[in-house]
Amino acid sequence: MKYASIYLLMIGFSLFASCKEAEKKAEESKTVCVSDSMQSRITLDTAKLSNISNQLQLSGEVGFDENKVVKVFPFSSGQVMEVKVSIGDKVNAGQVLAIIKSADIAGNYSDLKTTGSDVAIAKRQLENSKLLFEKGISSEKDYEEAKENYQKALSANQKIQDALRINGGGNTSANGVYTIKAPMGGFIVDKKANAGNFIRQDNTESLFTISDLKDVWVWANVFETDISKIHEGYTAIIKTLAYPDKIFKGKIDKVSEVLSPDNKVMRIRINLPNDGLMLKPEMFTNVLIENTEQLKAVSIPSDAMVFENGKNYVVLYKSKCDLKLQEVQVLKTEEKRSYLSSGLNAGDIIISKNQILFYNAILEKQ
């Protein structure tokens, strides 16, 4: 009887051990592990607590920096004889832009010659009057009158010299021809002068506009519903049709205080360094404004999520053989990053590349 009890006890222990072994094998059969060969094919990302980005998409247009622009106006009326530059040409300071024939300039030189003769005559009369006055032959009144006439002749001559200086100075000649020269180096971004054109005295338009284009402005339109999302200092990402793979970055440096009466939009200005002079005035641009709010949320790469049956899941990684499917609630998505309202904590590690393989494997084991 004693040996029978011992025998039954041994059988019980054996059955218990067999059950434990079976449970262990069953549990192992449900475990999904990252093999050594798969380790190099996955990417691990850490959930981060980030400021929520509120991006705004706008359309814009490149313009030149008006603080670095010179408008060249005509000195006088006349006819354009020759234009030596075209829009887009690079010019140096002092380079001739156009040649103009002006009757006004010719008249100024004629008047200068006449007033110069008047000065010479008045000077001789003054000298004679002084000599006669000193010898007592003429009166003091005659002497004072001669001095006054001389001063009038000098003033008239000086007035013509000032007019010539204003109308081009050394760039003019006695036959009425004067040259318009570039006051600074840069590029011709606007031109309204053509050979044969007549320039009237009441002309208010510049003949040439010169800009160095080292910096440009991008003007963008903001609709009324988005005005609260725009402030000076926000980062702007600029893309153009000409360079679709190139990204330009600048800052909003001016926000208009009034809406356009035509289309009810507010204009903003973005100051942009123009490295390599790639950006040209009048280019169309897509403008992405990065508005970083004060609110924070856990964020992950959008590509890390698996969407199925109306829900989003991630593969939570704790170790090679400790993987778990975790449902997450998406608060908002901007570009390639998603902000979560629940599901993960900052510091959690997830698989963000080839996670679909492990997602399917874990489902099969469940």
Image: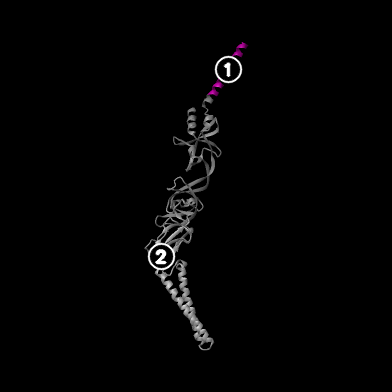
Q: Residue at x 39, y 69 (%)?
A: 103
Q: Is residue 207 above or below residue 279?
A: below
How crowded pointer 1 is (Cα within 10 Å; few <14, some 14-19, many 20+) is rated as: few
Residue 109 or residue 333, whichever sits in front: 109
Q: Inspect the image, locate mark 2, and give the three-letter code of the amino acid beneath it.
A: Ile
Per the image, label 1 sits on a secondary structure element best described as helix
Q: Inspect the image, locate mark 1, and give the three-letter code of the amino acid beneath it.
A: Ser
Confirm whether residue 258 shows in the render.
no
Horizontally, residue 101 falls left or right of residue 6, namely left
Q: Nearer the viewer, mark 1 or mark 2?
A: 2
Q: CA distance from mark 1 to mark 2?
A: 115 Å
Q: Residue at x 43, y 74 (%)?
A: 111
- The secondary structure that most of the magenta stretch takes on is helix
The label on residue 14 is 1
Residue 361, horizontal then vertical, whole percent? 49, 29
Q: Residue at x 56, y 19 (%)?
A: 18
Sequence-earlier tag: 1 or 2? 1
